[in-house]
């Protein structure tokens, strides 16, 4: 960062920066995220932030855990927001570090509104959301002009922890060729049943990507009709993304991490066809 030909803004006392840490790999941090880590007095971080990213913080910075994990005691959202306001009013430079992007199923909007209500100045620093970065590390593009012009991001659970209310599953099934589900492992059986009942094919390709972009990344390829059983048999665990649609089949030709480990690419008819058409 010493040789940048532009100037990054400083995280000033009394300010809160809401920063996306990306899906896991520290190399996917933005320059602004790294700037905040190097300048913050207090880092309030989520459960999904990779420890290697936290190690980039100032050695004397105070680290405060504010993660939420299903089924485990967790701080409430109002408590986290109040903590950010309190630290900023004390004149601290506060970094609120969130996995992925703070405004994509990250509740960053709620925290920002709390800062507005408290009169606290803040900056939003977007991060690479897991549906983009995580699937890219699995060799799955969220869009490809031969398969889809639409992609829809869906949360797998609502405020109560159940399948979200208010989702028009029939509209999703008919209107979006590719669906990417966040936090859906717990309710994957119910979601799959609803999509199939709404017209999606049981044999449609599905990928489950666990701990995306980390050294512990796992990818399970299945179909909509059998993915629930395959997940149970595999032991794959959250945090995980679920991608549904023909783009999953492109992984056969685009699994660059697998290629680095010696896997042979291009073994799916769709991927092979698209590659031939591109030549």
Image (spheres, rainbow, N blue to C red):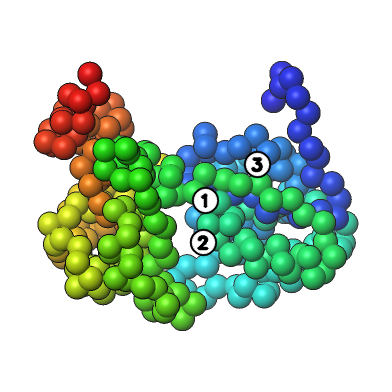
- Residue 13 image point, x, y percent: 86, 50
In the foreground, 210 or 194? 194
Disc 2 secondary structure class: loop
- Residue 24 image point, x, y percent: 48, 45
> Tag on residue 105?
2
Task: Say which residue appears at 84% left-offset and 46% top-offset.
Answer: 12
Judging by the rendered image, the residue that carries numbered circle 1 is: 100
Judging by the rendered image, the residue that carries numbered circle 3 is: 33
C-alpha span from label 2 to label 3: 19 Å
Query: Dot 1 surroundings within 10 Å: few (below 14), some, or many (20 or more)?
Result: many
User: Does the residue at mark 1 contact the one at mark 2 (Cβ under 8 Å)?
Assistant: yes
- Residue 274 image point, x, y percent: 21, 31
Horizontal side of 217 relative to 245 (left or right) equals right
Disc 3 secondary structure class: helix
Question: Quarter holding the N terminus?
Answer: top right
Closer to the chain start, of discs 1 and 2, is 1
In the foreground, 172 or 253? 172
Question: Quarter holding the C terminus?
Answer: top left
In the foreground, 199 or 106? 199
């Amino acid at each position: 960062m010493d040789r940048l030909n532009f100037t990054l803004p400083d995280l000033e006392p009394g300010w809160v920066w809401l920063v996306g840490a990306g899906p896991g790999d520290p190399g996917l941090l933005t320059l602004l995220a790294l700037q905040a880590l190097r300048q913050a007095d207090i880092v309030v971080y989520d459960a999904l932030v990779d420890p290697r990213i936290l190690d980039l913080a100032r050695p004397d910075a105070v680290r405060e855990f504010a993660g939420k994990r299903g089924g485990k005691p967790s701080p409430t959202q109002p408590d986290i927001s109040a903590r950010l306001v309190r630290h900023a009013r004390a004149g601290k430079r506060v970094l609120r570090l969130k996995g992925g992007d703070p405004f994509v199923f990250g509740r960053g909007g709620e925290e920002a509104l709390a800062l507005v209500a408290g009169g606290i100045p803040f900056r939003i620093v977007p991060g690479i959301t897991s549906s983009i970065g995580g699937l890219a590390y699995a060799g799955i593009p969220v869009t490809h002009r031969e398969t889809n012009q639409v992609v829809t991001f869906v949360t797998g659970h609502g405020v109560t922890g159940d399948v979200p209310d208010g989702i028009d599953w029939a509209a999703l099934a008919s209107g979006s060729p590719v669906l990417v589900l966040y936090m859906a492992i717990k309710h994957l059986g119910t979601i799959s049943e609803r999509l199939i009942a709404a017209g999606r094919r049981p044999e449609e390709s599905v990928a489950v990507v666990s701990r995306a972009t980390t050294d512990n990344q796992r990818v399970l390829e299945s179909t909509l009709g059998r993915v629930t059983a395959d997940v149970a048999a595999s032991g794959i665990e959250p945090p995980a993304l679920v991608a549904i649609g023909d783009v999953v089949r492109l992984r056969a030709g685009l699994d660059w991490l697998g290629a680095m480990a010696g896997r042979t690419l291009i073994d799916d008819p769709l991927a092979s066809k698209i590659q031939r058409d591109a030549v």
